[in-house]
Each structure stands twice: as C-alpha cells, then as structure tokens.
Amino acid sequence: MRNSINRPPTPVAEEDQDHQPTLQEIINIKLIESGEKERLKELLRERLIECGWRDEMKSLCRAFARKKGRNNVTVDDLVQVITPKGRASVPDSVKAELLQRIQTFLASASI
Amino acid sequence: MSSKINHPINGQIFPQPCPHLAEFRSRNGAKAFRALQDCLRVKPPSGRAAIRRDPDEVPRCAECGDSAGRTRLYACVRCAGVHCHAPPGPSHTAVHADSMAPGHEIAVDVDRAELFCCACRDQVYDRDFDAAVVLAQTAASTLHAPSSIARSPHPENLRKRRRVDYRPWMPDPRERVLMGSCSSPLNAAVSVSRSNDLPWGLRGLNNLGNTCFMNSVLQALLHTPPLRNYFLSDRHNRYFCQKKSGASNDATRRNGANNADARICLACDMDAMFSAVFSGDRIPYSPAKFLYSWWQHAANLASYEQQDAHEFFISMLDGIHEKVEKDRRKPQSQGNGDCCIAHRVFSGILRSDVMCMACGFTSTTYDPCVDISLDLEPNQGGSAKVASTKSNYSFNGEADFMNSSQSSGISTLMGCLDRFTRPERLGSDQKFFCQQCQVRQESLKQMSIRKLPLVSCFHIKRFEHSSVRKMSRKVDRYLQFPFSLDMAPYLSSSILRSRFGNRIFPFDGDEPDTSNELSSEFELFAVVTHTGKLDAGHYVTYLRLSNNWYKCDDAWITEVNESTVRAAQGYMMFYVQKVLYYKASEKQVAA
C-alpha cells in the first residue's frame, strides 16, 4: 500500500541527462511551455466539430459497435478501425490552417 | 469534459467494472486514486483535465522516450510509470502490465485523465475517480468567476447534469403560503367548462377588423411551449414591468422625446393575453390592447387594412426585443439569443459561405434569424394534371391527399430546405469581391444553419413579385409538410461535410445516424394557413395540442382531423424542438 505514486521512475531521469533532444522535441517542448499546444488542440477540436468530422467519426463508431455487439467492442478495437479513416478524412483546409498557425508560432519563437 | 462525454450509457446504467479494476479497488480501498488526484491539472483554454506530476512536466514513455506524436501516453496508477500505447503498433503500456506483478493493469491517459485497463484493452470507468475529475474541472472553471453557489460534491449530481428527469412540481409549505397570499385561484367555473375536454388555453380571438393576420400568429405564439412557459411562470410580470412604470423612470427620462412610446410594452400585453387565454374562460377574447400597442410600435402598419401575417410576426418579435433592450442595455447581439424572450425562443444563426470560383477562397458570415423564409419549389415535371390537382387543394379539406403525394411533382418542406441550403452560383451580375484574388469573381454561395432555435418558424414565400410582368401574385401551390422534422441535414456541420468531398467511408450498410441527436429533431405544433388572393384573403391557424388538431378561425375553435391539416395551404409553419414537446402528447403519438 505504500508504493509512492508520486515518485517518478528513476531510469527516465537518468536517461534524460545524456539525451540530446531532437528538433521535433524542442518544438514540442516550446509549444507546451508557451501554452500554444493547448490552444492548437482547442482550435483543431473546434474545426473538426465544425466540419462534421467528429459526427462522422461518431457515426462510424456507432455503426461498428452495432455490428460487433455492444459488449464485444473495446476502445482498442475502435481506435484500430477508426484511426486510418479518421486520419484520411481530416479536411485539407483544416490541416493547412494548423500548419499555418504552427509556422507562425515557430517564426515568432525564432527556433 | 472529455471524461463526461465518454460515459457510454446515458450516465445512468453503469458498465460493470472489469475484474482488474475491481481487484485494484479492493486492494487499495476507497483511497485508490487519492494520489492521482493531486496530479490532476486543468489546462486553460479548453478546461480539460490532464495528469501531470508537476504543471510543466512533459511526460514521455519510459521505454522509448516518445513524448508526443502518434501515440498516447498512459501512467500506471500503481507505480506511476509512463508508457506509450498505440493500438496497431507496439504498446509499452501492455508490456509494462504484463511484465510487472499483477496489479499494474490499470493506467490513466495522461492527456485526458481517463482510465484504461491494459489487460482488457478498454476504457474503464470509476465513479470516484470520474467524480474527482469533474469536480476539479468545475472548480477550475469557476475559479475565475467567483460564484457563491456551492457545488454539491455528490458524484450522482454531477453525473446527471446533462439529463434532467421530469419531475412534477409540488409546492412546499412555504411556497403554498406564498401562493395563497399572492394569487387568486382560477374560479370554479373553469372546471365545469373543462368538462368538454378541450386543452387549456384554447380561446378564440375576436376579429377586430381585418385582424385575422394578427389572430392567426397570436394563436401560434400563445401555444409556443417555451413562450407559454415563460409568460405563465410570471417571468415577465405586467404589474412590475419597468417599462410601464411612471415617468420618473430613468429609462423614460433618457429617451424623453418618445415618452409615449416608452410606455408601450408588447411583452406586458402578451402577459395580459396569456393570463386571459389561460384563465379557463372560453368566451372569445379581444386582443384590443395588444393591437393598439402594436400599432404604436409599428405605426406604418396601423390601419384596419389586411396585413401580412409574417410581417406582423417579425414586427411583434422586434417589438418585444426592442423594449427589453432599451431597458437593460445589454450589449449582446440577438444572435446568441440571450437578449429577450422573443429571441431566446426564435433566434437561430444562419451561416453563409461564399466561395470564389477562381481560387477557392471562402468567406463565411453568420447572421442571426428569427425565421427562415423559403421559396416554393418551381413546378417540377410541369404536367398540367399535377398542377391542376394542386390548385384544387385550396380548401377542399380531405382531398385525395395520398394519390397526389405519389406523383413525383409534389413540393415538400424538405425540398424547400434542400433548395435553401443548396450551393447557388451567383450570376455574373452579382460578382463577389474575393479577398484573395483582390478582384470581383464569380462565386458559389451556400446557406446552412449554424445554430437551431428552440422554435423554428418557416415562412413560405407564397407572395411572388415578378419584376418582368410588373405585378405580384399569390402562389396557391400545395406544399407538403411533415409533422416531425429532422433538421440535421441542413446544419452547417452536415452541409460542410458534404462540401469537403475528400471522404471515403467504405463502410458496408451504415447510414449516418444523426437521429440520436435530440436537438435536431422538431415537432410541428402550429400551421398558419392563408386562403384567398394576394390582396384579400383569410388566415386560419391549426394548433396541435395533446396531439389533437384544432382549427382557430378568429373566434371559432373547432377540432379537426389530421388530414385537414395536411391538406391545408401552409403559409407559416412552427416547429418546436422535440425535447420541448410534451411527453403527454408524445405517448399518444406512439399509441
């Protein structure tokens, strides 16, 4: 009962020190630190709802669950089935808008 | 909020916890997730919950060091080890659960604060944990706006916030005393007159001289569920209305110029009318006071001439809105529908997209609306026979409705809505200035509905003006309208979905199942019909109360059957959101 949940696993911390962050990781950290990542997520969420993507995914999930039976579906199954379709059907305009936002951010953060 | 949305079954029936979660709980007791609660962080813009040991931590997989990207990260609730999990690919979370001693199956998604069982490979739900998350989120959202409302920490309450069960109201002793001292009960005669079993609030309105245009709309408004509830629950009390109280009033002094104008308040007259109509008295009522107030509001329409019912409808909603706005000086636009009762009930938001045909640049505008005016479809097929049967419809009651509906040329309300939301090419004479091309270009315009109102009013443009023939005429064509209407296909989301064409859904036999969305389903409750010609005619309203239809022809109210209504020449149709349509009548629909 005493195992501490707050204690970070030690190996990670050790590895971190000799680990040289890649550009992608630096960008990721900058995005998180500035709070931009949360804003981007929120924007993406909004756009995906607006364009009907979420409804589309919802109905796909429903159809899948109906086909397999309500008690025979796991989240993993759903993710496996829906992910490729979900990725493929994000409208280009949404991708372009996010890309634009990220580029602007990078320019302003001067990385 | 994501944890709430993901609750699968109505928030009522709860899924059986998986054996691993049950074991984890029994091993760790009620405080199983105590340590996790300290790591709950609610992030600003979205207000979603995440799990972080300290606020700026960037969690990464202990195995591969992946911090974000295509995988999800899960923290083991037993040992706090963070691992990645991406279903088709390798999962370090699953490896962790397998390699450790039993008891490490339950993990929490660090970005969503949702529980996951690595052994079952499925989302799991724990009341206490979810309640803690919801509580943290509510606390974070109320942090900025201090409110005195103490939220009950009871998990049951939090869970049921989205669905409220109907419970009939019973006054408690205190309220009973208040009611006794502040109101007078409806007189006993009411119960006698009710014996003929007409629903409450059915009372004829006297024609005050060509005022059937007003009576027909008023009948519809008097039985608009949200509007009726508003006035009958005394939300606008004519005895306490700021507008009408004397000249010492601040508001009155400010616009001292139109002093007389300041004293009229259409909402007060509505309130008076609601009281009179729902008093139980069946003798036809004369809305003279209301008419007088409306004349003052819309001076250009003040006469004993015949008027257009739709024009009156718009004008009187406007009147109610205007008064409230002057009073409270609320800065809100009417689109968000927060300003006054008229707009809270009727106001929706239309979206209009204009796409440049040269570069594809789209400009989007949102416009509030209180009704939707629809063009009648042009006569399809053009067969003379169809046309003639249609014109015969005007008032033969139960004509052979079924026969003609089988002919393809019939106009329907859905057809009109399809036309309304169809992409329309703007002609070369009305080129649109494209911001990207910086010149006027040919463009494509498309309307859709961004936000549905509580009550949708459809106005059919039966009065047609031809600039070529320099004359106006009335279109008597029959229009079929459904009693239940699903607006989902006309919503912006659906319209946009069909516009972004790059979607492939090779799913066998699945239809987009939007019927579960309560908010897009509507029920018909009133139809305003017009008979006669452009310059002289008569308006009659059909009301649907407890699923019976009643014809309100000025002072006369008679029960009619469904086919009469279906055959009528609809001019304005009023639909209310199905969730607001009353259960009592719904049962009868099902029966």
Image (cartoon, grey):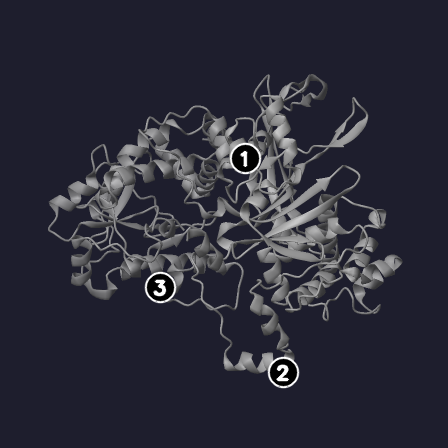
* Residue B360 position in % (x across, y down): 56, 21
Choose between B143 and A29: the one closer to the eye: B143
Q: Quadrant of residue B21?
A: bottom left
* Residue B451 position in % (x across, y down): 56, 43
Asked whether, in this view, residue A97 is left or right of residue B470, the answer is left
- Please give the chain letter of the residue carrying mark 1: B
* Residue B136 position in % (x across, y down): 39, 59
Could you say whether the residue bearing mark 3 is in a helix, strand or loop? helix
Could you say whether the residue bearing mark 1 is in a helix, strand or loop? helix
Badge 3, how many Cα within 10 Å: few under 14, some, many 20+?
some
Query: Is residue B348 visible to us here?
Result: yes
Residue matched to label 2: B181
User: From the viewer's perspective, is the residue at label 3 or at label 2 nearer?
Assistant: 2
Could you say whether the residue bearing mark 2 is in a helix, strand or loop? helix
User: From the viewer's perspective, is the residue at label 3 or at label 1 nearer?
Assistant: 1
Residue B155: mark: 3
Q: Quadrant of residue B164?
A: bottom left
Residue B454: mark: none
Residue matched to label 1: B414
Query: How far is the residue under mark 3 from the one under mark 1?
Result: 43 Å
Asked whether, in this view, residue B296 is left or right of residue A60, the answer is right
Residue drawn at 79 percent across, 55 percent down: B294
Residue drawn at 20 percent across, 34 percent down: B90
Choose between B226 and B207: the one closer to the eye: B207
Query: How far is the residue under mark 3 from the one under mark 2?
Result: 39 Å
